[in-house]
Image (cartoon, rainbow, N blue to C red):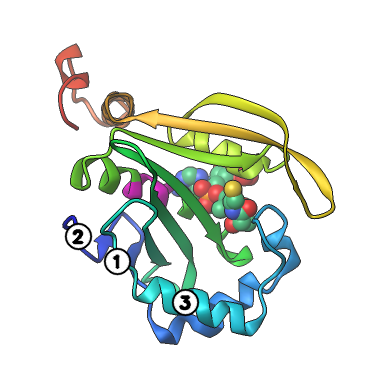
Amino acid sequence: MPHITLPIRTERLILRRFEGSDLDAYHAYHSLPQTARFLPGPAKTYTQSMERVGKYANFAFEKEGDWVALAIEDPARPGLQGEVVLKWLPGRGQGEIGWTLAPAARGKGYATEAADAVLKLGFEELGMHRIEARLDELNTASAELCRRLGMRQEGRHVDKWHYKGQWATELIYAVLADEWRVDRALKRRTSQARPGNLAVVGPSSITGSA
Ligand SMILES: CC(C)(COP(=O)(O)OP(=O)(O)OC[C@H]1O[C@@H](n2cnc3c(N)ncnc32)[C@H](O)[C@@H]1OP(=O)(O)O)[C@@H](O)C(=O)NCCC(=O)NCCS
């Protein structure tokens, strides 16, 4: 298995392996139709949540088709806030990212922060070359999240899926390792240039590894 150092700590969050004790919190948001609206299946039954949490808790990332599945926690708030996943797609250096938050955890930038850390994991630790996200065109929250992460829309497949009783148009967003590094460096430069921070960063800072 490629080396994955867990937990991952971000500014506000801890991304860690799922545990059996996450089951009730996981089921609380995955049993809601509003959570399932843009996910492949219907709202989960308790048995389905048990199966999924068991799978996530024991994930192995050894071959194409495997997933890294990370529980999102904020040490300042009790309980599971959501999950972020990274799939090893067929082909050299290819990955797919996905995310879900509990309703109370939305609107705080948690998904952006967690997904950014998983892109870093994919590109810097797992050596991925390209990471994509596939979403329903009506899922504007996910599309905005992709754009916040520096992913660009590279595909639109009209009526690609039929689920939840209707046809859905699929959008594909993606980012390459080099694009992600440049975007990260630019964001860092912008935050360093904020009023009160006098750091001046030259063009050389946007090349090379972040
Ligand atoms: C997709 C999903 C994870 C997006 O959640 P989200 O809360 O919109 O995304 P973030 O956690 O990054 O938060 C962004 C929001 O927090 C706000 N925010 C507050 N503080 C922030 C910060 N520090 N950084 C970034 N955004 C911040 C942003 O302005 C944005 O608000 P807006 O939507 O009103 O513009 C969520 O809608 C979800 O779980 N949906 C159900 C499951 C699903 O559809 N999964 C995807 C299938 S493809």
Please give the name of the residue rendered at 28% of the width and 23% of the height, measured from the top-left corner.
182
Quadrant for residue 10, please give it.
Answer: bottom left
Kind of residue at badge 3? Val
Q: Going from the N terminus, do you reach mark 1 or mark 3 first? A: 3
Residue at the disc numbered 2: 1
Q: Residue at x 32, y 49 (%)?
A: 117
Identify which residue is drawn at 34% across, 43% down.
119
Query: Closer to us: mark 1 or mark 3?
Result: 1
Q: Residues within 10 Å of mark 2 (few under 14, many from 20)?
A: few
Which of discs 2 and 3 lies nearer the camera? The answer is 2
Q: Position of residue 164 (x, y in %)?
A: 79, 55
Q: Indicate the position of residue 150 as horizontal and vertical percent values.
A: 43, 30
Q: Are marks 1 and 3 in contact (CB under 8 Å)?
A: no
Q: Nearer the viewer, residue 38 or 7?
A: 38
| Residue range (magenta) | 112-118
Separation (CA) of disc 2 from disc 3:
20 Å
In which quadrant is the N terminus drawn? bottom left
User: Residue 169, relative to residue 42: is it above or below?
Assistant: above
Instruction: Determine which residue is flagged by label 3.
Output: 53
Q: Residues within 10 Å of mark 3 (few under 14, many from 20)?
A: many
- The answer to whether residue 4 is visible is yes
Secondary structure at numbered mark 1: loop
Residue 78 shows in the view: no
Q: Is residue 21 above or below residue 78?
A: below
Marks 1/2: CA–CA distance: 7 Å
- Are circles 1 and 2 on residues that touch, CB within 8 Å? yes
What kind of residue is marked 1?
Answer: Ala
Q: Secondary structure at mark 2?
A: loop
Residue that carries the numbered disc 1 in the rendered image = 60
User: What's the amino acid at mark 2?
Assistant: Met
